[in-house]
Structure formats: structure tokens, C-alpha cells
Image (spheres, coloured by chain):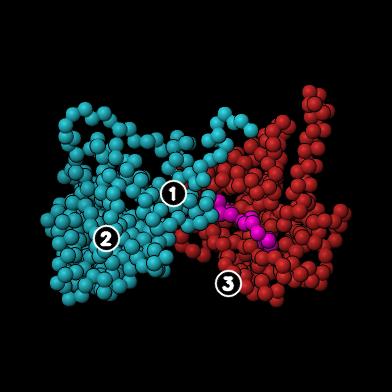
Chain colours: A red, B cyan
Amino acid sequence: MIEEPYRWVEAISNRREYIEHQIEGGSPIACLGYKDGILFLTLSRERQKIFEIYDRIAMGAIGHPGDIERLRMAAIEVTSTEGFTRSAQDVSLRRLANYSLSPVLKAAFEQVYGAPYLARMIFAELGRGDDPNLFVRIDYDGSIHSNGGPLSRISENFGVISGTALSMSLMEKFLKQQDCSNLNLEGALGVALDAWTVGHLTAGKDALDELPSAEVIAVHRKEQLATTIIEAAVLEHTSSLPITYRPLSRKDLEVFQKGD
Amino acid sequence: MDSPDNASVFPPASEDFSSLLRRHGCHPPVPVTQQSTGRVEIVQTEATTILAFKFAGGVLVAGDRRATSGNIVVYDRADKVLEIDRHSLMAIAGVPATAWEMARVLEHSFQFYRRSQLQEMSLDGKVRALSKLLRDNFGFVMQGVGVVIPIFATFDTVSDAARLYFYDAMGAQFEATDYAATGSGSPSVRSVLYYENTWGKTILREMSENEAVILALRALDTAAESDTATGGVDRRGKSYPIIKIVSKAGITTLPEKTLAAIYKAKIT
């Protein structure tokens, strides 16, 4: 089937279509930098989608739970081993993404006789001191999209994933219009919920380059909050401890969960 | 489906951190040397004093700062009371290289467990983890190098009380009801604590933080009086013992300024 180059390209493209279709329904995840660190937020019905990876790194993922689990464990193993044999300072998201995860995902994707990973992930790393935060999206084919972190000139202080490319670009468009860097946690939660709503509203759409209006967002957000629960976690630099990850409790989210 | 190596397809439900390190070749097991005959001369190298006791506000853990090699003082700023996580302390008497490595493994084990299993390791699990590290290290102990005898203090959120454990070199764990001590200066410290707890004005458990700190400093001073391996206080060099407290709120380290003031008023 794949002896000829054309067949191989065809096989890859079929595979891409298949995976995109599988991931399509995933609930969006919005991450954004705010005054005290980075906020991860999604709405879900049952399974956990936001995870701690290391002292300053967290991840959110959509896709097949089995594949997400394997990738999550790999990320924890790589960072924990590095943190132990060298030091916690030597653990970096840039290296985890570029040298560990991306090559493995690409290889699995292109070996057309093996199974690819059905997962799309968003990672964030809390900047040390004055360094900007780093947001990295890694796809099932190993492709990486990041905000550039310290290397970028205009650093966007957010990252998103969603089921479709269109809804991701609209979530990004929405977040570009917001300035969250000085918001407190409650303010950041409000923006993240709106960004999630934009992603969720536009996930099934084909062609759309306009953001939904504020009223439409508010109505949809209220509807969704009535039937699903918020899952959120922060990486915060307010604590003196090296561990910065903290899942938000029911109490932290109660204001929003009541549906305003 | 037939898999030639099922073990690699399904990792164990919760692989512990030491096994992960071993798999990556970062933490080779300690070789056990062949001991053909008779007694092995074990060199006692727990030259230090560590003490811990329960008081009204939690568990206080104190240690002197001296590190020795034979009769040479190597370092007078050693920190032998190590924070393992938000609520756990490990205090060490023994060979520093092994002890610090053990503390690092332990610290990473707890984090690794929480991150990978998405739940906090239980108190019993934590206590056992240190026991297992000691057991794994026994090869070194038998060779006369690398003996470590730690104390482990933590706050148990289930019973809502501070807990205190001490170990032997092979990894047996014992829960202390009131106090524990380890290191070469421990006989005199143990006597002081026993005396205070039995005939003193206030029993250890009911002491205030201030009373507890004074007692800890006096006990360490008593140990330093007769044990050369236990460091005293160097006021010029500002090196005071390390005192940490485990309570519900977490771990607090007493600042040097506080210790200096208490020393001036109550010890000398």
C-alpha cells in the first residue's frame, strides 16, 4: 500500500483526517497568564483534563484517554528524572517539547502501520523571575506551536487547544483582545470562561472569521455552566515553595459555577 | 494479542521513583559484597545529634550543624534537618553523601507519586518509602560505609496530629510516642528528654513553642558538652542549630535572630 511515495502521502492524509475527526469533539482548554501566574481552565463532564507535570509545568489535553495517559506519564518521567539527576532549574518545557515529545509523536504519526497518538496538548511553563511564561501546543503529528517564550518579541501571554483549527484561532483572536496580565484570579477565571465559550461555540462551525458577540457568549456560557463543571488549576508564583501547581477547589470556583 | 514482553506494554500500576531511576540507569543498586566469614566490623559514623519531640504546637525537630570525618571537623554549617514536602521533615545522622541522596530520592518519590497517580501518598506509604530506601542501602552499611539513621516527622491530615518516626540502619520503623533522638550525641539527649518528660515542670506534649525551643537548645548544648562530634554554638560565626517545626500549617524554620535571642536569655 505504501510502496509508492504517492500512496504514503495519501495514507498520511487519511490518517490526519481520521485523527482530526476523533479529536473534533474535545472540550476546549484555555490557558492564560494573570497577575499571580498561569490559569488553566476547561469545562468537562467527567474526566480530568488538566495535570501537573513538574514544579513549574502543567499540561491540558484532549483526545483519547489512553494516549493522553501515556504522553502524560512520559512527560512526568522525563522531567522528574532530569530534575533528580541535575536540578529542578534544569527542567524546561522547551526541551521537553522539542527533544522528547515532538520526535516521538512525529515518528508514531508517520509509521503508517503503527497506531498514532490521538491527542492534542497544551503545556505551560511559569517564567522564572521576570521571564515571560511559555505556552506550547503539541499536536498528534509532533508539530509545535508556541508563543515563543523568552525568544519572542511580542510574547502572547496565553495558549489554547480545541477540537478544530478554526475554533482555536478564534479563541486566540478573542484572547488577543484581552489584557489579563494584571487581573486577579477571579478576573482571569472570567476571561478564561469566555475564551472557552468562544471555542465551544465555534467548534462545530465550518467557516467563520467573526467572533461571537458578547451577548451570545454570555448566554452560551450560562447554558453550559448549568450542565457541566469547571475544571481549573493554576501555576502560581506567590508561594515560597518550589511547587507552583494548585488545582482550584469547588470553593474557588463557586462564584462562577452558580451560573452568575 | 501476543506480546513478547507484556511488562513493557503495561507498566506496574504505580511504579515507584527508585525503580524509574534504576530503569534509566540513574540510581544503580548498591552492590552487596560477599561476606564469607564471621563478624563484620561496622564503623560507627553517625557523628551528630538530632532530636525531635512532640509539643503543643506539633513536632519540633532540631539538629546541630557539625559535620565530621574521624576527629576532623569538616564543616560547621551542615543542614541535617531536611524538608521533604509541605508537611514532612527528614533529619539525618550518618554519612552525609548517602543521607542527602536519600532525602533527594524521597522528596522526588513523593512528588512523582502525586503527579503520576493524581493523589497524595498516604502517611503509611511515606513512612514505608523511607524504610525501603534504608533497606536498599544496607549493602553499603555492611561494607562499613554509608550508614544512615534518620528521623521522620510529618503531619497526618487523617488523624489531624503530628507524627514522629525513627528508624534503624536496616529500615525498621518505629513510631515515637513523645520523643526520638539519633546520632552519637543521642544518649545524653535522650536522658534530658526523658527527665523533662517525667519529672519536669511541664510534660513535653504540653509545652509551648518557646519552652520547646529552649529545651531543644539546652539538650543540644548538653550533647555538645560531652560529644565532640556535636557542634555547639558559634556566636561569632553566627552558626546556631537548625530548628524546624512541623504543624498543621506546614513547616516553619526558626530564624537565626530568634535563636540568638533565646540563646542569650536562656542558655548562657
What percent of the width, then of the height, locates residue A234?
Answer: 58, 61
Answer whether residue B243 is visible to the viewer in this image: no
What percent of the width, then of the height, locates residue A207?
Answer: 87, 54
What percent of the width, then of the height, locates residue B178?
Answer: 25, 65
Task: Check if mark 2 and mark 1 are on a common chain.
Answer: yes
Give the amino acid type for the residue marked by disc 3 in the picture: Lys
Element under disc 1? helix
Q: Is residue A5 above or below residue A215?
A: above
Going 33% across and 62% down the picture, which residue do you hit? B163
Going 14% across and 72% down the picture, which residue do you hit? B199
Element under disc 2? loop
Badge 1: residue crowd in 10 Å (few <14, some 14–19, many ≥20): many
Task: State the quadrant of the C terminus of chain A.
Answer: bottom right
Q: Earlier in the sequence, mark 2 or mark 1?
A: 1
Query: Which residue is under mark 3?
Result: A251
Asked whether A161 or B221 is in front, the reply is: A161
Element under disc 3? helix
Q: CA distance from mark 3 to mark 2?
A: 37 Å
Which stretch did the figure color magenta? A41-58
Task: Check if mark 3 and mark 1 are on a common chain.
Answer: no
Give the amino acid type for the residue marked by disc 2 in the picture: Ala
Query: Which residue is under mark 1?
Result: B109
In the image, is A234 to the left or to the right of B173? right
**Is there a contact, CB below 8 Å, between mark 2 and mark 1?**
no
Q: CA distance from mark 2 to mark 1?
A: 24 Å
In the image, is B230 to the left or to the right of A168? left
Label disc, if present, on residue B176 of the rendered structure: 2
